[in-house]
Amino acid sequence: MARWTSLMGTLLWAGFYVAFHLYGASFLFSKILKMPWRGAIIMQMYVTALLVIEKGLIFLLFAVTGFTTSVSFFSFGPIAATFLDNHFLIYFFNQLTVFTSLIIAVQYRFIRSFTKISPKLILFGLIMLHIFVALFVALFSLVPVNDMLSGFMEGATHLNKFFFVGLSVAVVAFLTANALLLFGEKSILPKSVYVSDYEQSYARTYDTELFKEALTAPQGIVEIYVQDHEALEQWTVSEGDRVTAGSELALLNEAETEEQRAAWETQKTALEGQQTEVRSSLATLQQAKNAQSGPVSQDASNNSEVTNEDGETIEFDVNVSVGVAVPQDGSYAAGIAQAEQQLASIESQLAVLNAQLSQSLSNPSVISPVDGTVSKINRDTAPLSIEIYSDEKVFLSYVLEDEWPLVQVADAVKIQGEGIDGIATGTVQSVSEVPAEKSKWLEAYHQLDPKEQNNPLAYYEIRVVADTPIEEVMPFGTNVNTSITVEKAENAVALPTAWLFDYDGVDGKTHVLNINGRPQTLPVTTDFEDGAKAVLSKGPEAGTVIIHEDKLETFVSPPKVFMPFPGRQPNFEDAKNTSWRAYVEYVLAR
């Protein structure tokens, strides 16, 4: 609203300025000097045209340089502003330009042609008139009113050749001195810089997302082993069958049951020992995290074979490692998550063994400890085994080496695909630190998202779990699209990265507009970059006007700035509720 009101006032003053020089001055010359009105109006038409041309030249000069000044390039103002501190004298000399003699000459020739006044008196009167006008404008300029009626006048008289050459040299020297005073690197004259790039900062939520292909996989995989081929009589299920906890999976040979039960007892003992180790590691990690002490690491051996009471060696696979590595930066979340995952795996295997050991010796069989789907049965090579996918599903994906540091456990995820109504939400359940081993899952991922990778090992498994169970039936292996929110900042301000200077990727500076209409350097700190914008963790508040202009860094002291006229139309309600005093202030003074 203020900008539109100021524009209206500027247009009114411009109209008054032209009208006064064209009609007002013509009227005064015709009445005081008894000049014909037609002659006076023609004379002032030339004068007004010269003034408009002079304004156009100044505007063009300022447009080329990119800033404005309060003194004219064609006047004595730059010299006065450099060596004098008196504002009245600066304004006075600013009215006396190199074009003053030209306008005096035009008026002199017309007045001498239409009156009988002595030529010397005419010339003296015109000079005194322009000096008086300069004094009046200088006095009036002390009031904070922009673009007052200021005359820039120029003229010439009958000059001989030598005087003309000398005058030309003086004029060139005069303009050169003004150019140095106005545009030199050490210029101390106040300037107003044109800034085309600016915006008012606002706060909102910013985030960056990592888009990944994912596969529907089981939350857990239960493997049940039968060490002795002779102990198994027959499998009672096939691949793809649904089973429930307690369902019969295979019949055992009663004569060989004792030996198989001994193998299961041995596995149970080894797993219970490892369970104790992992629980101890987990407790130590949690204590260290609370105390913010150094890293902790504990390991337990993975016994893959034991000797029974008869001296026979029995091989089995426990599939558990209790090694826990904690980052040196004191973040124990990853180590705790790893230990909890290992503990859950051990407890799952113990549940399998307890389920088998609870069977009656009179009717031995292998039973399922969980609800799920039979995925694979090894009928040929020892040890025989059956693999069951749990009913709970996760979404399995892989990140590359440069993506791995971005993804953290508990990051928010959006999930979309066939079998999902709309967009489901979830979180990252785990991020592996170990390169993914070759598997059907990794091979399928390579087909879904083929990428050239110099390091073939640099694929790391991540698991995403939905916040709420997905009600639709989805077969294992279904492809879904996921977007992982790797960075998020709420109620944050963002700026174009190109508007920051002295920027090292984290810390930098930008220019804001202070209440006095001058640029002010403000340090900023970025949280992350979102495309071409830098999201700030420290910097300007919402509502601050941010400006971008490379020239601002070259000024000794901050100059005033002026910006393009806003394209947004003023609101009628705001205009109606604005006090009339504000309109008067901006029309007359701003």
Image (spheres, rainbow, N blue to C red):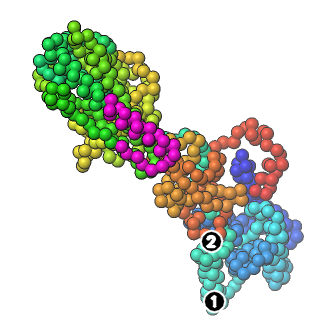
Residue 132 in the image: state x and y as whole percent. Answer: 84, 75
Which residue has dot 1 on it? 166
For the residue labelled by badge 1, is the local secondary structure a helix, a strand or a loop?
Answer: helix
Which residue has dot 2 on it? 556
Q: Quadrant of residue 451?
A: top left
| Crowding at mark 2 (Cα within 10 Å: few <14, some 14-19, many 20+) | few
**Foreground: 113 or 334?**
334
Determine the residue positioned at 23% across, 11% down: 361
Left or right placement of residue 173 versus residue 300 in this view? right
Residue 440 in the image: state x and y as whole percent. Answer: 22, 31
Is residue 585 in view?
yes
The disc labelled 1 sits on which kind of residue?
Gly
Look at the magenta stretch and give its main secondary structure. helix
**Foreground: 361 or 537?**
361
For the residue labelled by badge 2, is the local secondary structure a helix, a strand or a loop?
Answer: loop
Is residue 35 in view?
no
| Crowding at mark 1 (Cα within 10 Å: few <14, some 14-19, many 20+) | few
Q: Which residues are magenta?
A: 272-298
- Is residue 71 part of the magenta span, yes or no? no
